[in-house]
Amino acid sequence: MMTKKTTLISALDLPELAQALAMVDRIGPQVEWYKVGKQLFTHYGPQVLQELKARKKKVFLDMKYHDIPNTVANAIRSGALIGGDIIDVHAFGGPAMLEAAAQAMKETGARVIAVTVLTSMDQAQLEAVGVHASPQEQVLRLAKLARQAGLSGVVCSALELPLLRKELGEEFLTVVPGIRPAGAAAGDQKRIMTPRQAQEAGADFIVVGRPILAAPDPAEAAAKILQELA
Ligand code: C5P
């Protein structure tokens, strides 16, 4: 079997823009994709993307939109306009919201993916909000809704990756956080895979934060991950 191309996205989970950009410059041209999340974006806004674009980077704008369909569709248009190459929404927003998101996506060059069940939600957390399915069943249900609506893919944990690959086919994008190179500290991540395992399980993108950001030499840490994926 041919192993697929798996692209590394480095999560820019740092509080200050200057610090984040110094990190990007330190990592250098080897990493093309960065994930910009709520912390940095809420403080600095579109400037974060402008700075990344000036460095020829691609951006996964991780805003996890969840609102009425019209609002989410417009947020995606705005996100694409400021340079988001991948933008995410919560699949729990429902079919109408996902269809509106897919429609907005088609007007832009961006890809829109869906978050299914947050990895912080276990059975008890789901029950508390009235979802009487197992996390696994709920993930699959929401991922299928996202695909039916015409979205590009899902964010999923390493644990769910094999099931989603099997059920949703090869074309549907999978973006997988919770990646730990052999020997790296797991931190608060529980469902982890190495870059190579994620690639073998069919990940299109892996999202790696602390194993790069907190490494003594972030460029070297990124290079090692890229070697594993080569
Ligand atoms: O530092 P670490 O590699 O754990 O960072 C992973 C990134 O992916 C973080 O930005 C985290 O918020 C995000 N993420 C995750 N698990 C999910 C969804 C997103 O770890 N289920």
Image: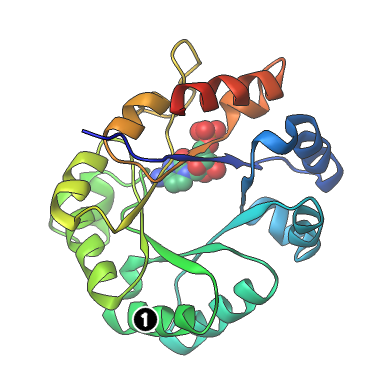
21 over 101 or under it: above or below? above
Q: Provide the secondary structure element on which disc 1 rests.
A: helix
Which residue is pictured at 22% across the width and 74% down the height?
148
| Three-letter code for the amino acid on which mark 1 is drawn | Met
Which residue is pictured at 62% across the width and 20% down the height?
221
Q: Residue furthest top?
A: 183
Q: How is colour applied across the structure in the image?
A: rainbow
158 over 218 or under it: above or below? below
| In the foreground, 34 or 122 | 34
| In the foreground, 75 or 4 | 4
Residue 158, x across and y down, in percent:
31, 36
- Residue 127 figure quarter: bottom left
- Residue 15 figure quarter: top right
Q: Residue furthest front?
A: 2
Residue under label 1, please give it: 97
Quadrant showing the N terminus: top left
| In the foreground, 135 or 140 | 140
Describe residue 41's horizontal placement relative to residue 181 as left or right.
right
Residue 142, x across and y down, in percent:
24, 63
Inspect this view and state whether residue 180 appears: no
Which residue is pictured at 42% across the width and 39% down the height?
6
| In the foreground, 178 or 32 | 32
Residue 176, x across and y down, in percent:
40, 42
Residue 116, x across and y down, in percent:
32, 57
Which residue is pictured at 23% across the width and 46% down the height?
124
99 over 219 or under it: above or below? below
Describe residue 4's horizontal placement relative to residue 23 as left or right.
left
Neighbor class of circle 1 (other Cα within 10 Å; few <14, some 14-19, many 20+) is: many
181 over 104 or under it: above or below? above
